[in-house]
């Protein structure tokens, strides 16, 4: 029986049964992620494969989304595909004998908020500096042509400093 999308998941029960849960979330639902986007449009798909790992409930989380970011060169929109694959174990972070290649997720494993995990993974997948790629067109802000450094009206406030350093 499928669970409603907003209802917390029971990671213990799902891990014992080896369940696979697939969800699709609108990007606009994620407040923390939406703050970093040019347009909060589209959706994120998540697939979480539950299993037991040394008696602990564990899962493999795969998240994908296409988002519209703000190019840091031209301040225009730039589309990027975000992907993440993470191995999780649902136990307190200070528990001994947890697998080193799994990320520990604390809290009550019987009340797993999958949407929050998906948003966290998307935030971690964001590029440090969003910008158009070499094959994409990046236009200067305001559509202006690039300034020629030799134009006389260009202001150079520190140009006189090189003369001070000579003495």
Image (tube, rainbow, N blue to C red):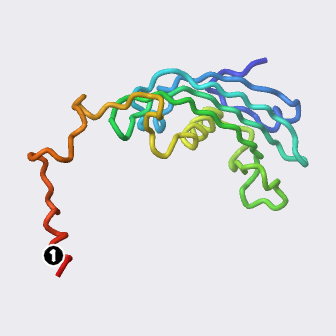
Check the image and report above or below for 15 versus 7. below
**Residue 66 percent location from the top left of the image:** 54, 26
Read off the residue under disc 1: 164
| Residue 155 located left or right of residue 14 | left
| Residue 57 located left or right of residue 138 | right
Other residues around mark 1 within 10 Å, as few (<14) / some (14–19) / many (≥20)? few
To which quarter of the image does residue 8 belong? top right
**Residue 128 percent location from the top left of the image:** 49, 46
Of the pair 19 and 131, the residue shown nearer to us: 131
Looking at this view, name the residue that lies furthest to the right.
54
Looking at this view, name the residue that lies furthest to the left.
153
| Residue 127 located left or right of residue 45 | left
**Residue 78 percent location from the top left of the image:** 43, 29
Looking at this view, name the residue that lies furthest to the bottom.
167
Measuring 17% from the left and 82% from the top, which residue is drawn there? 167
In what quadrant of the picture does the N terminus appear? top right
Of the pair 161 and 57, the residue shown nearer to us: 161
Count of numbered circles on the image: 1
To which quarter of the image does residue 165 belong? bottom left
| Residue 106 located left or right of residue 43 | right
Measuring 57% from the left and 37% from the top, which residue is drawn there? 122
Measuring 74% from the left and 39% from the top, which residue is drawn there? 110
Check the image and report above or below for 19 versus 131. above
- Element under disc 1: helix
**Residue 126 percent location from the top left of the image:** 53, 40
């Amino acid at each position: 029986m499928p669970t409603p999308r907003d209802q917390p998941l029971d990671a213990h029960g799902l891990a014992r049964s080896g369940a696979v849960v697939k969800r699709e979330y609108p990007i606009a639902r994620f407040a923390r992620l939406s703050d970093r986007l040019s347009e909060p449009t589209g959706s994120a798909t998540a697939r979480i494969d539950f299993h037991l790992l040394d008696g602990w409930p564990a899962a493999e989380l795969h998240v994908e989304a296409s988002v519209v970011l703000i190019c840091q060169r031209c301040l225009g929109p730039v589309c990027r595909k975000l992907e993440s694959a993470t191995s999780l174990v649902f136990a307190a972070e200070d528990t001994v004998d947890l697998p080193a290649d799994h990320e520990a997720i604390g809290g009550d494993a019987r009340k797993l908020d999958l949407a929050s995990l998906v948003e966290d993974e998307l935030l971690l997948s964001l590029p440090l500096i969003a910008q158009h790629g070499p094959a994409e067109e990046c236009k200067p802000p305001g559509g202006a042509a690039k300034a020629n450094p030799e134009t006389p009206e260009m202001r150079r406030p520190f140009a006189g400093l090189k003369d001070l350093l000579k003495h």
